[in-house]
Image (cartoon, helix red, strand yellow):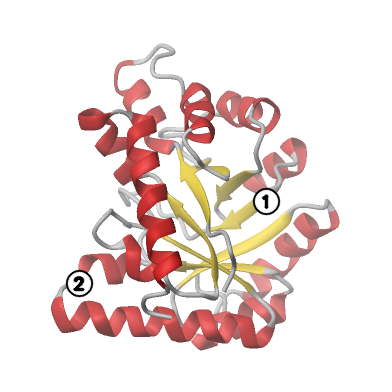
Amino acid sequence: MAEHLRLGVNIDHVATIRNARGGYHPDPVRAARMAVAAGADGITAHLREDRRHISDDDMAALVTDIPVPFNMEMAACDDMLAVALRLRPHAVCLVPERREERTTEGGLDAVSNRSLLAPIIGALGEAGIRVSLFVEPSLAQLDAARDLGAPVVEIHTGAYCDAAGAARQEELTRIQAAARHCQDIGLECHAGHGLTYETVGAVAAIPNIMELNIGHFLVGEAIFIGFEASIRRMRHCMDEARSAGIGG
């Protein structure tokens, strides 16, 4: 079990609030700095093709102005590849993207899209950018990610978070099996999407997961308790579950 489970904070929806009215407030870069002060180990932002929240200027500032690794989420397409190669973030997470979706819906299909993904993963790797694939907890998807040369996967936890009772336990079992398989085949395992104070513990306790990426929930909780407080509470929930070793 890793001694420290990393927390990546996604600040997309700080920009969503800003863009609802226009102007410069609230500033996602300021939010990123606050997240680091509250215990975040990294910052994530998704530059969408339609620029619905994070902007190109935001991305440039996040790459240069924060003191922790920056993870750029992006669609696997030539336009986004060009942006990533220009900005040179620490890491890129390739995610599926549809214009009509409200948020990322499910994992990337690495099995069916090998020919699309291979050159993009190769170009990012050659530029010294660490690549991860956002995938479902499917052994076939993990094997495809390994074959494509991605050193990291991020397991989609949305189905687990949305389920209840026995169905949630089934989804958790899938995530646990996926995390073990990652270790067996040499992939670093991250996880994220939809995690809350209620749902994070069982995932944080999985010993093969090295990092959790959480965003929308923390921005929402900030309305009630403040941004730094929301992150500190999540950090506490993660650390407590990791120490207890529940669910491994």
Instruction: Examine the image and state in which quarter residue 116 appears.
Output: bottom right
* Nearer to the camera, 226 or 162: 226
| Separation of marks 1 and 2 at Cα, in angstroms | 30 Å
Q: Is residue 235 above or below residue 209?
A: above
Residue furthest to the front in view is 244
For residue 110, which numbered disc appears in the image? none
Residue 77 seen: no
Q: Which residue is mark 2?
A: 163
User: What is the total number of numbered labels drawn onto the structure image?
Assistant: 2
Q: Position of residue 36 (x, y in %)?
A: 54, 34
Q: Residue at x 39, y 70 (%)?
A: 244
In which quadrant will I find the C terminus?
bottom left
Residue 17 seen: yes
Query: How many other residues sit within 10 Å of disc 1, few (<14), some (14-19) or many (≥20)?
Result: many
Q: Which residue is mark 1?
A: 91
Q: Amino acid at mark 1?
A: Ala
Q: Residue at x 16, y 73 (%)?
A: 164
Of helix, strand and loop, which one carries label 2?
loop
Q: Position of residue 126 (x, y in %)?
A: 85, 57
Q: Position of residue 205 (x, y in %)?
A: 42, 71
Instruction: Examine the image and state in which quarter residue 121 appears.
Output: bottom right
Query: How many other residues sit within 10 Å of disc 2, few (<14), some (14-19) or many (≥20)?
Result: some
Of helix, strand and loop, which one carries label 1?
strand
Q: Residue at x 59, y 80 (%)?
A: 182
Q: Amino acid at mark 2?
A: Ala
